[in-house]
Structure formats: structure tokens, C-alpha cells
Amino acid sequence: MTTNAPMLGFLARRQVSAQWRGFVRSLVETLDVNLEKDDRDALLRAVGARLAAQMPLPTTTSLDALEQRMNDALAETDWGFVEISFDQERDRLVLSHAAAPAIATESDAGGGWIAPVLEGLYTAWFAAQEGSVPELAATAVEVTVGRLQLDYGLA
């Protein structure tokens, strides 16, 4: 995915309504103070899975169709968009998510805490597809402001 990093960062920060920025920042900072990072991330993955349950995708027969359904759902929530490709050498899907919402926290200026939320969202969406393999999961491998690359495969 060719990206303009400053533009994506700008869009990512704007995608969160002003009325929610302080609340979300306070929520994530409270999680950071009260939970170890692994526990916080597990909770945020569970939130992502719950979001997927609230935005179920119909079963599709192709990766292109699934990508389109994901992008339709992401557009409804103003959470950016995803491009999916297959990395044959590593035997996994690569999800390039752009314009993810970004809210900085005291310890995370880039808003990277959104990564485990998206891991949970994508893992649950894939798991709901016919023929899914329960051992597969989405894992963030690169996180910048508003842009994430996730691998979907064996963890």
C-alpha cells in the first residue's frame, strides 16, 4: 500500500469525534495504569472481537469480496480501510489498514493502542467465515500513526 504518512496521521487524528477524544484517552490511560500491558492488550482484543460481533460480515467466497465487506463495515464506523494480500513465502495474509483512528495517550503519542483492538476485530471477522481455522489470528507487525500492518496466520 502506497501511503502518504503525514496525511494518514492527520486523517487518523480527525476521525475521532471531539466529544469522544478525552473519554477514550482517559479510558486507555486508566487501563494502562491498572493493567499490565499483556492484560490491557487482551482486553482491547476482546473489545475488537465484540465490535466484530456488532458488525457481522456475511460469509463470502473470495478474499476480494471479504475485503470489500470489511471496508464497507469500516466505512460505516469511519475507521479507515484495509487492503488484503497473500504472502506466499510466509503462508499468511497481510492486512494493510490505513486511516485507523488515532488518539494519543500520555505514554503512546501515536495511538498504537488501537492495534490490539484491530487484531481482535480482524481475528473475529475471519473466524466467522465458513471454513475458518480457529488457530489463526491477526497480529500487528508494524504500527505508525493511522497505519497498521497485520499478519493473519498462525500466531
Image (spheres, helix red, strand yellow):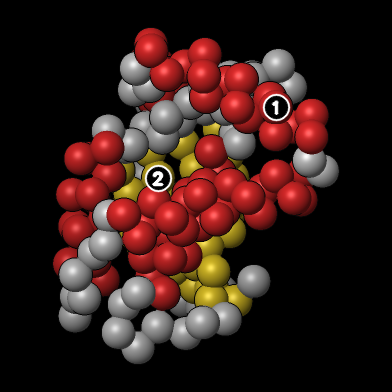
In screen coordinates, is 139 left or right of 106?
A: left
Q: Quarter-wise, where is residue 60 in the image?
A: bottom left
Determine the CA span between mark 2 and mark 1.
26 Å
At horizontal 42% and vertical 19% (from top left) the residue drawn is: 20
In screen coordinates, is 29 left or right of 95?
A: right
Q: Amino acid at mark 2?
A: His
In screen coordinates, is 104 left or right of 121?
A: right
Task: Count residues near mark 1 (Cα–Cα under 10 Å), then give few for <14, some for 14-19, many for 20+.
Answer: few
Q: Which x, y percent locates residue 10?
A: 40, 16
Q: Which x, y percent locates residue 123?
A: 47, 65
From the viewer's perspective, is the residue at label 2 or at label 1 nearer? 1
Q: Residue furthest bottom?
A: 131
Q: Amino acid at mark 1?
A: Thr
Instruction: State whether residue 86 appears in this view.
Output: no
Q: Please name whichever residue, 40 or 88, is drawn nearer the observer in this view of the structure.
A: 40
Circle 2 sits on which residue? 97
